Image (cartoon, rainbow, N blue to C red):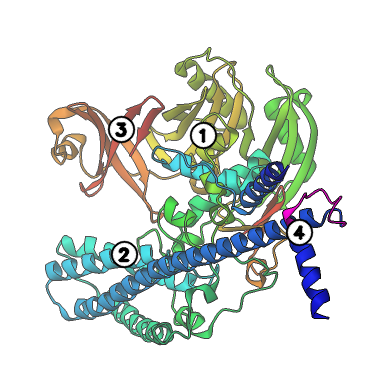
């Protein structure tokens, strides 16, 4: 037995050291298979190393990401605690100047909370009520601050509202604390909230942890807040004042489009959908327009009430610019008259990629009514109207009874800081971001190279707004 | 012959590496203005959609900026974690031609066109499974998306 083994081993040694072509060793391909096996082992080893390295990288990245989320959370809760304290103080001060200071701080903190809240990786809808509360408190504080800065003390109702908001802030902090407890204990991890958008296999809803939904649940009984600010509840319930009349049918809507663009120019018109539950109910159409350039698809919405074209968009390539802006303004005006918009004046415009977008405002008795806004897009290669938007007008237009100004223009001019730089003036009705309209004198001026507009309230003489006019290559913009 | 085999295996190895590395979207140099950022978001979310659908996506983003329930800036809304798949899959970083349709759509949205009449949400009915999103009130349907409040 031993002898056989020894001979067997020595024969194998001889085979390996000898020629490799299988002729002498007797097993063709043996050497090749052996080499292949070694290569596969090498590849597997390298792959495993690579996998380990990738995993390590992922762990580091996850840690960095968690750090960011933790930072946002801690900053956010810190500022909310500040807000609770400040709301308390606002109830205790009797001086409007001090109150103005406190309210300004509340507003400032609210913005910081908002920024950090928007960085947390939570599922859509999880913290919307919290965000809304913060936005409204900050907004409300800003409005009250404006009032206190003028020396006007807070009314009893406003004090009660602050007290109420303070209560909610206290509850919010309690619920945040519970969530924080879970975070510190390690029972809650940010990746469990799965708002990163990186869920591989999830086809079903991710269950929202109780402690997070409790945070938003703080505001279940929150009363509606109505005040002069953009986040006030009344801003979400607006009605279209400019729409009146009978409901029209789909066919009548198509006829309306035909009368605007020329029936013979519209082909293949199809109703795409009925839009309901928005501020304006409309029929949505897609059609082909036979213009002078090329056929392309256009889209338009016609209102169910009154049959007005709410908007129209026709996206096509634009050739070389042939027309100037004044010609475009004329074309726009004609289109508006054809569409039933009388007495419109062009105000501002932009020019982008060979298309001019011109803003028109309604004029009543020489007063520019800015809220009644319509926009027309004109292609500057052949003057074709390629866009139209009238929602602003349809939401706010009505025949207004404009009073006589309570102060004269000369008196109003005295309130302008740069009265010597004023170039022209007029009357205007301007919108605010909380839905009210203000009747003002509009003064246009130029300081050094900066064009500007100042609005002085025609009834109270207060300076309501300042706009800078930016002349850029893209047209005239106001800020 | 041994060397040739080694080369083949090396090449396979390289190909293997390249295949498993996640696709790297190009990063552009230069600061993103509102139009640029909005256009990239529209590109990532609604590239094959009808023009009105692209304007609609832009309008939803702007509606969120104005709403008390969402961050107060375009960047804040777009980059809110989990809000847009274009961010999590990197599509937001794909540079776009300044003359492209999505830029025009972004400009129209910024200039006030809103085919959604104030919507804050949109979803693809064929793929969306979230119970919460389906609880939103539908206002309009454009292309392959429902838009809701």
Alpha-carbon neighbours of circle 2 within 10 Å: few (<14), some, or many (≥20)? Answer: some
Answer with mark 2 or mark 3, whichever residue precedes in sequence: 2
Residue visible at 15% across and 77% down?
A93
Q: Which mark is residue A112?
A: 2
- Does residue A474 appear left or right of residue A293 in this picture? left
Answer with mark 1 or mark 3, whichever residue precedes in sequence: 1
Residue visible at 64% across and 45% down?
B53
Residue visible at 21% across and 48% down?
A462
C-alpha span from label 4 to label 1: 94 Å
Residue visible at 48% across and 27% down?
A352
Residue A298: % across, % down: 69, 33
Label 4 vs label 3, nearer the camera: 4
> Where are the magenta residues, as a range?
A14-26
Q: Chain of mark 4?
A: A
Question: Up-down: is A339 above or below A19?
Answer: above
- The answer to whether residue A32 shows anywhere in this view is yes
C-alpha span from label 2 to label 3: 30 Å
Marks 4,1: beta carbons within 8 A? no
Residue position for label 4: A14
Residue position for label 3: A469
Label 2 vs label 3, nearer the camera: 2
Q: Which mark is residue A375?
A: 1
Question: Up-down: is A231 above or below B30?
Answer: below
Q: Chain of mark 2?
A: A
Answer with mark 4 or mark 1, whichever residue precedes in sequence: 4
Residue B145 falls inside the magenta stretch: no
Out of A252 and B44, give the one closest to the viewer: B44
User: Magenta region's main secondary structure?
Assistant: loop
């Amino acid at each position: 037995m031993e002898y056989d083994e020894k001979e067997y081993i020595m024969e194998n040694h001889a085979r390996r050291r000898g020629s490799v072509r299988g002729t002498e060793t007797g097993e063709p391909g043996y050497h090749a298979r052996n080499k292949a096996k070694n290569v596969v082992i090498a590849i597997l080893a390298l792959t495993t190393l690579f996998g380990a390295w990738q995993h390590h990288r992922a762990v580091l990245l996850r840690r960095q990401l968690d750090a960011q989320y933790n930072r946002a959370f801690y900053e956010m809760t810190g500022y909310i605690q500040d807000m609770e304290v400040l709301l308390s103080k606002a109830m205790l001060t009797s001086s409007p100047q001090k109150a103005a200071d406190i309210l300004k701080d509340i507003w400032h903190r609210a913005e910081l909370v908002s920024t950090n809240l928007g960085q947390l990786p939570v599922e859509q809808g999880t913290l919307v009520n919290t965000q809304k509360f913060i936005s409204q408190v900050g907004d409300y504080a800003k409005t009250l601050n404006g009032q206190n800065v003028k020396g006007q003390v807070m009314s009893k109702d406003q004090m009660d509202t602050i007290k109420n908001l303070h209560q909610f802030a206290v509850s919010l902090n309690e619920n945040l604390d519970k969530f924080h407890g879970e975070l510190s204990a390690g029972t809650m991890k940010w990746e469990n909230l799965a708002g990163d958008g990186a869920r591989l296999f999830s086809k079903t809803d991710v269950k929202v942890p109780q402690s997070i939904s409790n945070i938003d649940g703080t505001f279940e009984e929150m009363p509606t807040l109505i005040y002069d600010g953009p986040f006030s509840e009344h801003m979400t319930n607006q009605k279209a004042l400019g729409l009146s009349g009978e409901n029209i049918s789909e066919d009548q809507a198509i006829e309306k489009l035909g009368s605007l663009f020329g029936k013979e120019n519209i082909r293949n018109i199809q109703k795409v959908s009925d839009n309901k539950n928005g501020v304006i109910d409309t029929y949505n159409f897609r059609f082909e327009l036979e213009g002078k350039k090329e056929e392309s698809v256009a889209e338009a919405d016609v209102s169910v009430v009154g049959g007005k074209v709410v908007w129209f968009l026709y996206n096509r390539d634009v050739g070389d610019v042939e027309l100037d802006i004044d010609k475009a303004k004329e074309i726009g005006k004609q289109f508006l008259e054809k569409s039933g918009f009388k007495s419109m004046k062009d105000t501002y415009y932009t020019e982008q990629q060979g298309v001019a977008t011109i803003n028109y405002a309604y004029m009543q008795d020489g007063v520019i009514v800015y809220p009644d806004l319509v926009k027309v897009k004109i292609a500057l290669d052949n003057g074709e109207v390629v866009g139209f938007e009238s929602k602003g007008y349809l939401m706010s237009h009505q025949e207004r009874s404009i009073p006589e100004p309570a102060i004269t223009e000369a008196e109003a001019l005295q309130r302008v800081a740069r009265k010597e730089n004023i170039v022209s003036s007029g009357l205007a009705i301007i919108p605010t971001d909380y839905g009210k309209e203000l009747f003002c004198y509009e003064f246009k001026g130029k300081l050094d190279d900066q064009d500007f507009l100042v609005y002085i309230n025609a009834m109270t003489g207060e300076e309501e707004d300042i706009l800078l006019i930016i002349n850029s290559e893209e047209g005239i913009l106001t800020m | 012959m041994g060397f040739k085999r080694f080369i083949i295996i090396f090449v396979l190895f390289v190909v293997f590496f390249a295949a498993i590395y996640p696709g790297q979207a190009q990063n552009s140099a230069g600061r993103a203005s509102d139009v640029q950022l909005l256009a990239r978001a529209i590109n990532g979310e609604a590239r094959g959609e009808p023009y009105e659908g692209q304007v609609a996506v832009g309008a939803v983003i702007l509606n969120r900026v104005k709403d008390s329930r969402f961050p107060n800036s375009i960047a804040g809304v777009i980059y809110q974690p989990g809000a847009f798949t274009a961010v999590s899959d990197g599509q937001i970083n794909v540079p776009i031609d300044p003359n492209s349709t999505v830029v025009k759509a972004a400009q129209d949205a910024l200039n006030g066109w809103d085919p959604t009449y104030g919507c804050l949400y949109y979803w693809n009915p064929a793929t969306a499974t979230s119970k919460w999103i389906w609880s939103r009130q539908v206002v309009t349907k454009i292309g392959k998306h429902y838009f809701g409040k």
